[in-house]
Amino acid sequence: MRYSANKTKSTVLGWSFLIPLVLYVTIFLILPIIISFFYSLTDWNGISDSYTFVGIQNYIQVLTNRILYPDFWKSIWTTIKYALFSIPLSVALTLLVASILNSKIKGERFFKTCFYIPSVTAGVAISAIWIFLLDPTYGVVGFFNSTFGWELNILGSEKTALPALALISVWGGLGYNVLILLSSMKNINPQLYEACEIDGGGTISKFFNVTLPSVLPTLFFLITTSTIGAFQTFDQMYLMTGGGKGTTTIMFEVYKLYMNEYEVGTACAMSYILFLIIAFVLAIQFKLLPQSGGSSVFTRKERYAKRCMRELQHEETL
Amino acid sequence: MQRDACVNYSTKKRFKVGRFFAYFFLVLLAFTFVFPYAWLIFSSFKTPADLFSTTFSILPIDSNGHLYFNFDNYANAVQMLDLGNVFFKTFLVCIVNTALNLFLNALTGYAFARIDFKGKKIAFAIMMATMMIPGAIMTIPNVLICGKLGIIDELPVLILPFIMSVYNCFLMRQQFLSLNKDLEEAAIMDGANHFKIFFTIGLPMISPMLVVLGITTFMWNYSNFMWTIFAVPTNSDAYTLAKVLGDLISAGSNNANLYPQMLAASVLTSLPLVVIFFFLQRFIFEGISLGGVKE
Amino acid sequence: MKTKFERIILAITSLMLVSCGNPASSDTLNFMVYSPATQENITALKNLIAEYSTSTGVKVNLITVEKENYDETFRSAVRNGKFKPDLAYIDQPLIATYAEDEIIVPILDYIDEWDDLELSDFNQEVLSTNEYKNVLYGLPLNMTASVLFYNRDLVSDGNVPTTWNQWKDLTVPANKALFEGIGVGGFAGWYFQAFAKNAGGEIYDSTTNEATFNTPECREAAQFLKDIYRNDTDYLIHSSTSPFLNGNCLFKIGSSFDIGNILKQKPQFNLGVALMPSETGDPQYSVMGGENLAITSVSKNKEKAADLLHFLFQEENNTLLSSFTGNFPAITEYAQTEDTRLQVVLEQLEHVVARPVVPNWIKINDNYLGKAIEDILDYETNRDIENALSWAEEAANQLLG
């Protein structure tokens, strides 16, 4: 009796806390999704008052019409290549930098500020800077070209344009990722490290047995958000290469449809296809990668370390 | 005892070499971050002629080899951007949005973490699922919705669609989950309800995360450009720095005359963020060690 | 806790107060324009409009938009904007699309009421680009043609090519590129039309409503472009910023707007201007551009908008507005200049090709024709000419229906 009354009370309370979320999600997330899906079944061009209902024609056209949409499948492959390059690199670099910063380095604050600089500079300004620095006649690359006779053409060559954009995005996101990961690392119980040291572990062992398992939830979160971000990447292509030189991503194709071709219906259809792809990739990630439910779940090694600690304390008191 | 000493000795030596490489790596990496920004700042003082000269030099050096600082670019940028007014509007939008965003997301995160209610799992799953949706799907419909709400071309259109953020909500929930329950349980025994716990215990204890997310949300709002093209097409009273800067850069890409002003404008718009971050950084640093380790 | 709440309430209230500004008055004319490039010009424009307001008592709200984003902004404004434009600049290729969707209205009736201006006063070629299905939807404010720029330090006046063979066979100094290029995407498609015409071909057949990209003349034009691109030697220079301006390139294509720009950036640049070379040397065709004005269908003050339009076409005003871009007023009488370089542009305007006034042409131009040319000329993609042009032609015809 009492239990169910309490549960009802807390249910009402819980949902009242959630009112803003529900309102927001309904108005700005669910509604647009429905509207967007509706438009993907029409041939609306974004401005006229009339449109015709075409059913799944848009989807079929995007997937099969190689004359009107020749770059669609290429853009999927480009996006995958981009993700495969930038996500592992980003994760590895973030882990490396965060661990170094976590080990009582002098000037930690200085380094953190450095890495955060791109986040405080407007995205458009950053692109302008890099376009210039990578210019084969002026800029740093130009300097190397003229001094050493190289012929580097970073943004202008298919072989290097996409990796360059991936690198720049890893570079730009490092500050934010390190910040999140570092705050997670600082929450680790230092006694776990001591336990590991006592067992004869050095820096590397400490990392793999203590640090890595403890930040796994946060790491998984970073990987997920990086994946979602990578598959939706658009800004850099737009600003730096205009989609040329093998850098057309799915999102870029979608925006081209919105802005250049005035095919809102087809653009919506393409974004739904993108959504399915992202869902698919994330489902794979959920299956393959170790993740926690988000709360403090200890791995076997951590539990072992804790046990050693308790034994040690026990010994000392004896 | 001896075993400990042996262990300590070998770890110390390995440590020194490792530390050297660590520092070297960090410094090299930091250089790649500082250099472009330094280039931006120095170039903003150059004249167009020097900017495009093939002799690459970071510092603005004129034909006599003297260092000079051309402030014209800045004067022009301020005038072109109508900086005073736009600055105020931008800050207004960013502060209001960040405050509302943090508060509402913390509220929601707390509910997911600490209140037990029916349908919690489903609600959470749906919320997480919305993260996967590409932003492009939402832009045009959101413009239509905002049009129906009557807020297009007004400041609220820059705030309302971003008032909640699934990322922030999720991170808040994580933080609340990791808090020690002792204090809260004590408060419950004293007869406090969830609202009170949230305000008196919950919020203060996750203040490091609040600061971090506050900064990132503020910056995101500050740089939000593409949305303004659709959402604020005609009302110059509601222009933000991002929009004005974005316009200037678009103009600059077609007209190299404007390149220097563009650079100056970029520096001007970045400066407040750098300053804010530098000062709040200290706060985060202290905040994290305070709210950190527990038994 | 209380202070936090209070602060939030205060913020929301103040925000609402701030945003509840003046509602759009129904007697105000909203005039959407391309943003002039310099502060000086912006002020001149504002003064001109103020002059109009004082003399007629009609309030005009000037909305300046960067040309890059103009299209999206215009569409958003027409549908949802607080200040829906009454009179607006329209990019020429979009006139057909907007006319078809009834976003802009026919304006012949309004013009007939003007006694001081006739349609015959306009440059007819330029005027025709504003006609869709034989109905006039816009008025050209100004016009320009693209011409050949050359660096007089690298090419002497006597050596300026008028035929394609002359251009191809020019000797180029070491480490310099011959030609800066025709750009990518929309630009490539736009300029290609002139090169096709100069080879004796057309890219669109209005009698059958079909694209004709894959004709021998067009293929010849594409091959010629490949020849002057000289990809084995010039590719690196092509990838850098403004090679012509920085003295690394002999030739460039530009319009009157670019003349002003170049001289402002590098006043001592030795700029030469000539007509566009063609295969035979006579006639020498080029593309035309310019700015057009139209009245929108969402306007509640079409008569007043037409009146403002009339004002803008008065000689001094038209000349002033055109001067922002360095273009010429589209009214033949007003199009005069003393500047020797600009006189070449005027001469070029006698032989220009007009873009087909067909809905969706801009889509065809930017994404299919332009992309095909881009792929043909790119040093890495190096797409086969026939393959590229036939693809673009098929896509265009699928879209033309």
Image (cartoon, rainbow, N blue to C red):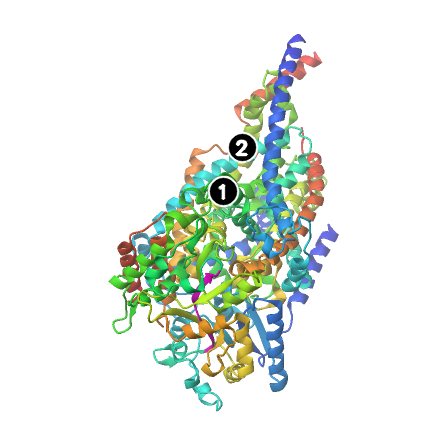
* N-term mark: 1 or 2: 1
* The magenta segment: C140-152
Check disc 2: other Cα within 10 Å, few if <14, some if 14-19, many if 20+.
Answer: many
Percent x, y for residue B159? 60, 58
Check disc 1: other Cα within 10 Å, few if <14, some if 14-19, many if 20+.
Answer: some
Q: Chain of mark 1?
A: A
The verdict on a common chain for dots 1 and 2 is yes
Q: Main secondary structure of the magenta part?
A: strand
The residue labelled by disc 2 is A216
Disc number placed over residue A145 in the picture, else none: 1
Q: Indicate left or right for A74 with A173 as reference.
A: left
Percent x, y for residue B137? 45, 56
Rendered image quadrant of residue A5: top right
User: Which residue is nearer to you in this view: B3 or C187?
Assistant: C187
The amino acid sitting under disc 2 is: Leu
Rendered image quadrant of residue B176: top right
**Disc 1 + disc 2, Cβ < 8 Å:** no
Q: Nearer the viewer, mark 1 or mark 2?
A: 1
> Is C150 in the magenta?
yes
Work out which residue is located at the far top of the displayed protein and give it: B2
Q: Indicate left or right for C223 with B197 as reference.
A: left
User: Which residue is nearer to you in this view: B191 or C107?
Assistant: C107
Q: Chain of mark 2?
A: A
| The N terminus of chain B, quarter of image | top right
Rendered image quadrant of residue C99: bottom left
